[in-house]
Each structure stands twice: as C-alpha cells, then as structure tokens.
C-alpha cells in the first residue's frame, strides 16, 4: 500500500480542500491565500491580483439587478431522464443529488428586474450544476425568458457559464441549440436589445448557439470561451497554441467579442449598453460607476 501511494495521481485542488471547513482558498493566478469571506465580499475577485473566480448564480443575480427588483421566472420545469442514461451512475440519481445541493431544478435562473433603472430580463447559467450543461430544461427556460422579455418589452441579458450540451439527454440536448437561436428572433423583431455575457467557462454547444448571437457579445476578464478546448485542438493539430488562446482578451483582439468588462464595472456598462441600443440618452456619471467594494486587509491575503 505504501508503494502504491507513491504512484497515485495527485488531484489538483482549488485551495480549499486542505483548509478547515473551506475557510481559505488559494488564488489559481497569483497563489495568494484568501479568506473565503473576503472573496465573497469582493465579488469573487482575488484581492491581490483581481483574478475573476467563478461566481455563484444567486450572487451574480444580486450583483446585476437593483435591490428588491428581481422576480424569478424559472424553477417550474423539471428535467426528464428520457434515455434512462447510465454512465458511472444513473443520470436520474446524479440529477437528484445535484438538485438537492443546488436547491433548484436545473442549471439556470431566469427572471425580470431593473438594472440601474433599466427594465431587463436576466438569465444566468450555473456552472456548478452539472457543469452548466444545456439540457432540455435550460434551453426551454432560455427560450421562454426571451419570448417573455419580448412580450414585456424588456432588454434581455444572458450570462453564460457552461461546458456545452448535456450528453445524458442526447438529441434532446442538441436541439436546444436551434431552439435558443430561434427564440432570440422574438427580440430582434421588436427591436429589443439582447446582450450576452460570456463568463468562465463558456464552451461547446452554448458557444455555438445563443451565447455568441447577442446584439453585443461581451466577456469577463480571463474567461475561457471556445467550442473545442485548447487541449483537444493542440492534440489534433500537433502544434503549440498562442499564449492566451481562447481567453476573452485574445478573442477581443480577434473580433469575436465586442468588449471585455471587469466585474465591478459590469452592471453599469451593461445598463449603458441597454440604453444605447434603445436609443435613449446616457448618463455619463452613471455609466462610469463601479461596484464599490472595500478591499480586504492585506494581512488576510499572503502570496505563497
């Protein structure tokens, strides 16, 4: 047994597995040790290097919408295991466990609210729920939210975070690419803005469908945005890839994104873009707003 441990593959961690109750996290960029409460208070940004960690859905919704204005639309549709799919465990059992932990039926939250006074519909994907994979429920919720936004004459803001189509649902998952693409036409016909925000990671069928079809397509700093991942491409073409390949800054330079927006500026910039796309005058002071966050004490973050 001792010899076997020498050759056992060490699993990389995000820094919290060795700390008591996950109180401390290690920044994957600068390796600073961060107190979890400080990270949460700082919008899931590293207080040392500003690395953008993945943000929970409820925190994202709270950040984007004005206090007390968000009305949830999603949560009434349940996924079905039509294929009775089994890999390392039955899909139905895997789904039930994740639903219990997340306290929601699937990997998305949609609803309506205000964003610095602008009436918007919001859809936010949850990467912690089966990798944010798009199955029949996610596609249906996205489509219904787009159609309801058109009916209520709201701008539509979608935040993607996904590994792509949900393999456990087969063709039912793949058809959501077409469904979500067509649903956005309802907004186009009524000349209502649709802005997609690509957060880390946005990949696979989500990238190849609605996520890149907004009137404006923006990314968060450092987000991985692709169809096939860099490792797959590198193994296929047998060549080294450029530095920063498929990251948001690289894609901005290549014209795939319209903007890369730091998280503290996201709400104000999105509200400004909505006003511009509606043809309304823009308040320059409000457009320059940032979410004000007190930086944690330096003693709570030590670079390793």
Image (cartoon, rainbow, N blue to C red):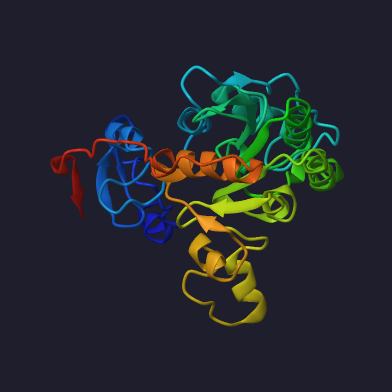
Q: Nearer the viewer, residue 285 or 43?
A: 285
| Quadrant in which residue 76 is drawn | top right
| Quadrant in which residue 229 is drawn | bottom right
The residue located at (46%, 57%) in the rendering is: 222
**Left or right: residue 232 compared with residue 20:** right
**Residue closest to the far front:** 281
The residue located at (70%, 49%) in the rendering is: 206
Q: Position of residue 13 (x, y in %)?
A: 40, 48
Q: Position of residue 45 (x, y in %)?
A: 35, 44
| Quadrant in which residue 37 is drawn | top left
**Residue closest to the far bottom:** 239
Q: Nearer the viewer, residue 93 or 49?
A: 49
Q: Position of residue 84 (x, y in %)?
A: 82, 34
Residue 246 seen in the figure: no
The residue located at (62%, 64%) in the rendering is: 256
Q: Position of residue 302 (x, y in %)?
A: 18, 49
């Amino acid at each position: 047994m001792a010899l076997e441990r020498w050759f056992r593959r060490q699993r990389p961690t995000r820094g919290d597995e060795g700390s008591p109750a996950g109180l401390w996290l290690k920044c994957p960029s600068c390796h600073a040790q961060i107190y979890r409460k400080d990270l949460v208070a700082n919008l899931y940004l590293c207080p040392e290097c500003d690395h953008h960690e993945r943000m929970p859905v409820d925190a994202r919704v709270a950040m984007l919408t004005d206090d007390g204005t968000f009305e949830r639309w999603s949560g009434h549709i349940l996924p079905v295991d039509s294929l009775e799919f089994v890999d390392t465990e039955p899909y139905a059992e895997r789904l039930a466990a994740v639903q219990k932990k997340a306290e929601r039926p699937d990997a998305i939250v949609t609803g309506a609210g205000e964003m610095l006074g602008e009436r918007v519909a919001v859809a936010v994907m949850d990467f912690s729920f089966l990798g944010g994979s798009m199955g029949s429920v996610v596609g249906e919720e996205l489509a219904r939210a787009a159609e309801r936004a058109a009916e209520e004459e709201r701008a539509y803001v979608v935040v993607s975070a996904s590994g792509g189509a949900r393999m456990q649902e087969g063709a039912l998952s793949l058809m959501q690419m077409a469904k979500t693409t067509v649903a956005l036409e309802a907004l186009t016909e009524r000349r209502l803005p649709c802005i997609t925000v690509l957060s880390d990671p946005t990949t696979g069928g989500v990238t190849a469908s609605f996520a890149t079809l907004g009137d404006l397509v923006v990314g968060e700093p450092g987000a991985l945005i692709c169809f096939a991942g860099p490792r797959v491409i590198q193994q296929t073409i047998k060549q080294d890839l450029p530095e920063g390949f498929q990251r948001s800054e690289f894609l901005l330079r290549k014209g795939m994104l319209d903007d890369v927006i730091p998280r503290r500026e996201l709400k104000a910039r999105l509200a400004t873009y909505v006003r511009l796309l509606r043809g309304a005058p823009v308040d320059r002071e409000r457009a320059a707003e940032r979410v004000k966050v007190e930086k944690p004490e330096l003693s709570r973050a030590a670079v390793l």
